Amino acid sequence: MKEYTYEQWQDILSQETEKYNTFCARGLKLDMSRGKPSSEQLDISEGLLTVVASNADCYSANGTDCRNYGLLYGIPEIRTLFAELLGVRSEQILAAGNSSLNLMYDTIVRAMLFGVPGGKCPWGKYEKIRFLCPVPGYDRHFSICENMGIEMINIDMGPYGPDMDTVERLCASDDTIKGIWCVPKYSNPEGKTYSDDTVRRLARMKAAKDFRIFWDNAYALHDLKTPGDCLLNLLEEAEQAGNPDRVYMFASTSKISFPGAGVAVIAASTTNLEDIGKSYTYQTIGPDKLNQLRHVRYFKNADGIRAHMKKHAEHLQPRFEAVLDTLNNQLLPLDIAEWTEPKGGYFISLNVCDGCAKRTVELMKNAGVIITPAGATFPYGKDPRDRNIRIAPTYPPLEELKLCCELLCICVKIATAEKFLNR
Ligand SMILES: Cc1ncc(COP(=O)(O)O)c(C=O)c1O
């Protein structure tokens, strides 16, 4: 970071405060906290609403009447579709309802109550269990742990994924560490993709027998640029390393079709999947197969989904560019913050100077703009350096987004000047 004199900080503060006051006078009421698609983006998948439209349409390829109960693991054609997309075998897929987060929560609850294959006892019987949490990360992963009383350990994210030296050291020496949360492609919020070496080390490392990698591949197909990032297949690597049961993979069409009405899957070894089935059979008599059928009929195959994702990319690119242009124009010359420029996913991660994130978010709020709370990207909502801010460019209309980013840059400058002026 550049050095500024006291007087220079004073100048920055007074100039930016003037601009800030003009923004405040506009009485804005905007929200850029939500990492969800806009209605316009949802319109891209309109055809899905009508693709299954009559009684005769309701049968899956194997003759199952999808209006009725049954097929606990989902219809064969959706399992095949996801298998191709995730690079696994179709018998390794359980296709469920609309939410992968729901599957993650259930997977943890099951492990707490009944344990997982290879474990001595249910996780809930241990006095204390721990999860590794690469940071910054996805707040809802962390809240599941908090909800279950699982202690969380921060692991710094580097350019190629979590700091693997620390992950390996901790997992090898502490068998109360039962899991790690990973968003391996276009991570939330940094948009980073794990390197091949990171994936292999996760597959091979020494860990408790009932240790599990929660591989939340929510953005597996969400390239913004071509070519997008490539991610090595963890299930395959874990099989080859002799740890086939170490992995639970999750994915969904939430940000491919509709977040409220998509299809979510879990992919795992046959042993894990059979183990899940033992209690899943008490939870439901079968998923929403009509919705699964709709998705297969609409997208047809993996290439159909890839082509559809290009439409999403075209829609999202101007939004990401608007944020990055503003950050580059407003903050780069001052050299007071860093941000990621992801090739895909849903977020941009901004690191301001230590101790300035909460104040920046507060200034935004006082000017009428809500952004993701500072700290949300860390376990317990506590960013030890108070510096990370998640920017979600997908939801607001483009003009609003530009306005919010202008304001964000002003607030970053004010918060930083205040810090150096000891205000
Ligand atoms: C990393 C990650 N995982 C999971 C989800 C939610 O997925 P689903 O809609 O399938 O529950 C999100 C939503 O933002 C996410 O960012």
Image (tube, rainbow, N blue to C red):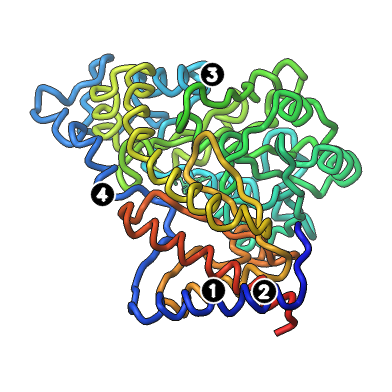
The residues bearing labels 4 and 2 have C-alpha atoms spaced at a distance of 38 Å
Report if the beta carbon of the residue with label 4 is closer than 8 angstroms to ligand 1: no
The residues bearing labels 4 and 1 have C-alpha atoms spaced at a distance of 34 Å
Label 4, residues with CA under 10 Å away: few <14, some 14-19, many ≥20: few
Q: Amino acid at mark 1?
A: Glu
- The nearer-to-camera label among 3 and 4 is 4
Q: Earlier in the sequence, mark 1 or mark 3?
A: 1
Q: What label sits on residue 16 in the rendered view?
A: 1
Residues at discs 3 and 4 in contact (Cβ within 8 Å): no
Q: What label sits on residue 39 in the rendered view?
A: 4
Q: Amino acid at mark 4?
A: Ser
Q: Earlier in the sequence, mark 4 or mark 2?
A: 4
The image quarter containing residue 124 is bottom right
Residues at discs 1 and 2 in contact (Cβ within 8 Å): yes
- Tell me residue 267's x, y (percent): 53, 28
Q: Is residue 143 depicted above or below 88 in this figure? A: below
Element at label 4? helix
Which residue position is annotated with label 3? 88
Element at label 2? helix
The residues bearing labels 1 and 2 have C-alpha atoms spaced at a distance of 10 Å
Q: Is residue 44 left or right of residue 137?
A: left
The residues bearing labels 3 and 4 have C-alpha atoms spaced at a distance of 32 Å
